[in-house]
Image (cartoon, coloured by chain):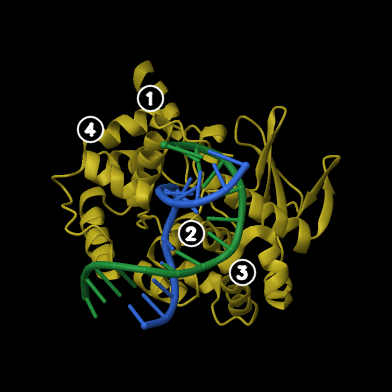
Chain colours: A yellow, B green, C blue
Amino acid sequence: MIQLLSKMQNNNAINVEISINSGQVFLWRKNGEYWDGVNGQDILRIDNFGSIKSYQNTKTDFFRKKDNMEQIIKSISKDSTTRKAVKKYLGLRILKQDPFQCLISFIVSSNSNIQKIKTSLEKISRKFGTKVEFENQEFFLFPTPKKLAKASINEIRNCGVGYRAKFIKEAANIIFLKKIDFESLKKSDYFETKESICSIPGVGNKVADCIMLFSLNKLEAFPLDRWMIRILEKYFFNEFQLETKTITKKQYDILHDKIVNHFGPYAGYAQQFLFKMERENYQKKWL
DNA sequence: CCAAGGCCTGAATG
DNA sequence: ACATTCAGGCCTT
């Protein structure tokens, strides 16, 4: 009985450090016992128990506390590799980010790495975001869609994003003009949402899955980057035979279908646990 | 529909 | 030192 109780508590626990250091967010820093980070037009301060203090006093469910982790873990634990990852990184959560910041972050992420993504996004915030003071410290909010839509490509490029600068400007403009509305996409299904955001320049399959998983509540999204492909080849060779070396759009769709068949509707959580485990195995740096 | 090549940049590799 | 390669992809040909 006591064992059962403690097991349940573990499954619902939140590990802030692990969650933030899992490649989902970039504008975060450790301040003593707190983690401070930029989330759109808000700044969050989080303590070790996952309690959130918000600059805008918004009640954001940043750690998705409403997700039933008991059920999710049970659902995705279809194989020994995933069970191992879940056990090792218990408390890892999918974070519910500001969608616009998430969109820009993952456009920046393409063909890049965490250190550089972080540097670029910090420059973008500092240059185009509003400076605010919170808990006696200086922060820059993430720029609004309007601000980035009006910025020149050269100004954006100077933040170290290279050829992605024009993607960022065009993406911001699409959101500013409300050609795509995140709130309505939150209510749409996976395929409809994916088709919509893949129309944004700089957004392909992988980036779209990140945006959907980390900010639009699509828990079946399963971002397939080089690391995940490597993981599938290494641990899931029998489950998902990868037919070609390069993942074309169609191959990506076929593979995603197989993945959801295997892991179920919360496949995105499986992805996050596996990704975290493998990156730690290779001692990759986070923030 | 698929394969191949180009792309900003900076850290790592030789 | 200095050149080449490579990294959480995407777009064009």
Identify the disc placed on residue A52: none
The chain to which mark 4 is attached is: A
Residues marked 3 and 2, same chain = yes
What whole-number distance in Å separates the C-alpha atoms at marks 2 and 1?
38 Å
Give the structural element (helix, strand or loop) at label 1: helix
Q: Which residue occupies 58% across, 52% down?
A: A117
Tell me where residue A29 sits by quadrant: top right
Residues marked 4 and 3, same chain = yes
Which residue position holds label 4?
A80
What whole-number distance in Å separates the C-alpha atoms at marks 2 and 4?
31 Å
Left or right: B1 as drawn, with respect to A89: left
Alpha-carbon neighbours of circle 2 within 10 Å: few (<14), some, or many (≥20)?
A: some
Residues marked 1 and 3, same chain = yes
Q: Earlier in the sequence, mark 2 or mark 1?
A: 1
Give the structural element (helix, strand or loop) at label 3: helix
Which residue position holds label 3?
A165
